[in-house]
Image (cartoon, coloured by chain):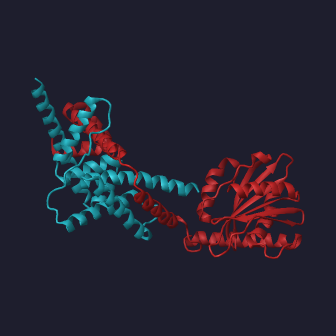
Chain colours: A red, B cyan
């Protein structure tokens, strides 16, 4: 057997060949018992080496310093995966987000002026945007949301990328609320994920999540009333939350209390 | 926090593989752990240079390999590092255990240039391109070293079996 044949058999064994090259090797192996035997030997040896090496480290006791370094590296690398808002987005995407932000902001602003004046001084901007978005989108029963429940997993993945931290739609089944849709909104504060829930009677709630700015303090859970609806909002080191619902304040308070203590 | 948890799981798997590779390189458990820690420390310092989406495993293996090479240069160790297998592998079947030990003994007899390609491909099923980048050698060089190494391994193991049979008879 020529040396190049040996190399080809190795490349075949390790899955390094394309379909056509692999087919050529397979055709040759059918007529070449020596090459077939070599392939089988190499395959067995590869398995043996892998198995033996795997067994070595299984005996290694945990090392606290290594574990600590591993965590620090995980932190450093995780920070690398968090997009820096405004600099990571490609120019085309940035333009699209800015356009969406402008549209949403105009829409929300128009609705805002028409319907309410923020009742409480000092309410974070994202809360007002969440209420506006709730009116514009969550209470529109005819138009489907941007993402349906069936595509919620891929939607949250996309939301997470855009917002820069992982987001997810909590299960509100214990309050007999079903997730009916989700959308991503562009605002001047940055991207905002909106999850829309519906109760048995058709009442809509929307949970809005935005990245918590590093330079702003955390908000403890607070509930405020807007005309015809109540809003519960709070923040974690990564995310700002706002749940907007009907004016049934006790029910909303119950939900946000549970959510804030579990997220 | 799923993305964070996923990254931690991947990193933990890679560190286990790094430790195995470090054992092969250093022949000593303490030295291997030191090498892994030095690798992680360098990786933390160089985290800004890591491109999200690129292969973290190859990046880490490459740091470890280069660290080992420079450590050896500093220590002026001229002898070729031999494979260190602390204890026979865990396997309840004695025949299987002997077979595996034979393969490892045979691996120990190979020159490092041939041994490391075999180990890297077996360790974590790296692609040839990834393993070549880890060892900092051209793909063609890696390719031929792997082929020669496996062929030599086959002959050594075959020789061991023949000797053993003669002894038994």
Q: Is residue A110 left or right of residue A170?
A: right
**Residue A191 quadrant:** bottom right
Q: Position of residue A251 (x, y in %)?
A: 84, 54
Q: Position of residue A202 (x, y in %)?
A: 85, 49
Q: Is residue A82 left or right of residue B141?
A: right
B73 in relation to B93, above or below: below
Q: Quadrant of the C terminus of chain B?
A: top left
Name the foreground residue: A227 vs A232: A232
Q: Is residue B8 left or right of residue B153?
A: right
Residue occupying image coordinates x 25% and y 37% = B100
Name the foreground residue: B52 vs A77: A77
Q: Position of residue A140 (x, y in %)?
A: 82, 57
Is residue A50 at all visible to an observer of this figure? yes
B47 in relation to B153, above or below: below
A214 in relation to A165, above or below: below
Name the foreground residue: B49 vs B24: B24
């Amino acid at each position: 057997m020529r040396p190049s044949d040996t190399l080809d058999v190795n490349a075949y064994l390790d899955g390094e060949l394309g379909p056509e090259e692999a087919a050529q090797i397979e055709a040759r192996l059918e007529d070449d018992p020596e090459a077939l035997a070599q392939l089988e030997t190499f395959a067995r040896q590869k398995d043996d080496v892998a198995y033996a090496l795997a067994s070595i480290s299984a005996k290694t006791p945990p090392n606290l310093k290594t574990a600590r370094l591993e965590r620090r590296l995980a932190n450093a690398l995780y920070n690398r995966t968090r997009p820096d808002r405004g600099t990571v987005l490609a120019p085309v995407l940035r333009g699209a987000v800015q356009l969406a932000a402008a549209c949403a902001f105009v829409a929300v602003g128009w609705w805002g002026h028409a319907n309410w004046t923020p009742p409480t001084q000092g309410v974070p901007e994202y809360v007002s945007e969440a209420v506006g978005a709730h009116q514009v989108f969550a209470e529109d029963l005819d138009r489907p949301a941007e993402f349906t429940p069936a595509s919620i997993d891929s939607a949250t993945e996309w939301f997470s990328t855009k917002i820069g931290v992982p987001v997810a739609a909590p299960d509100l089944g214990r309050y007999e609320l079903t997730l009916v849709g989700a959308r991503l909104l562009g605002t001047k504060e940055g991207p905002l994920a909106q999850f829309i829930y519906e109760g048995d009677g058709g009442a809509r709630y929307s949970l809005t999540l935005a990245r918590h700015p590093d330079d702003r303090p955390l908000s403890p859970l607070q509930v405020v009333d807007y005309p015809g609806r109540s809003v519960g909002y709070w923040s974690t080191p990564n995310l700002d939350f706002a749940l907007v619902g009907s004016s049934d304040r006790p029910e909303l308070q119950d939900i946000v209390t549970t959510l804030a203590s579990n997220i | 926090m799923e993305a964070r948890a996923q990254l931690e799981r991947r990193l933990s798997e890679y560190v286990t593989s790094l430790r195995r590779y470090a054992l092969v390189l250093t022949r000593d458990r303490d030295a291997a752990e030191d090498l892994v820690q030095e690798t992680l420390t360098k990786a933390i310092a160089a985290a800004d240079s890591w491109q999200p989406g690129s292969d973290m495993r190859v990046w880490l293996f490459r740091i470890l390999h280069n660290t080992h090479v420079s450590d050896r240069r500093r220590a002026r160790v001229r002898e070729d590092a031999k494979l260190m297998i602390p204890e026979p592998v865990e396997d309840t079947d004695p025949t299987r255990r002997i077979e595996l030990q034979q393969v490892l003994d045979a691996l120990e007899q190979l020159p490092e240039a041939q041994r490391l390609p075999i180990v890297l491909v077996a360790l974590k099923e790296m692609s040839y391109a990834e393993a070549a980048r880890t060892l900092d050698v051209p793909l063609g060089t890696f390719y031929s070293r792997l082929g020669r190494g496996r062929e030599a391994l086959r002959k050594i193991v075959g020789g061991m079996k023949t000797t053993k049979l003669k002894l038994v008879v």
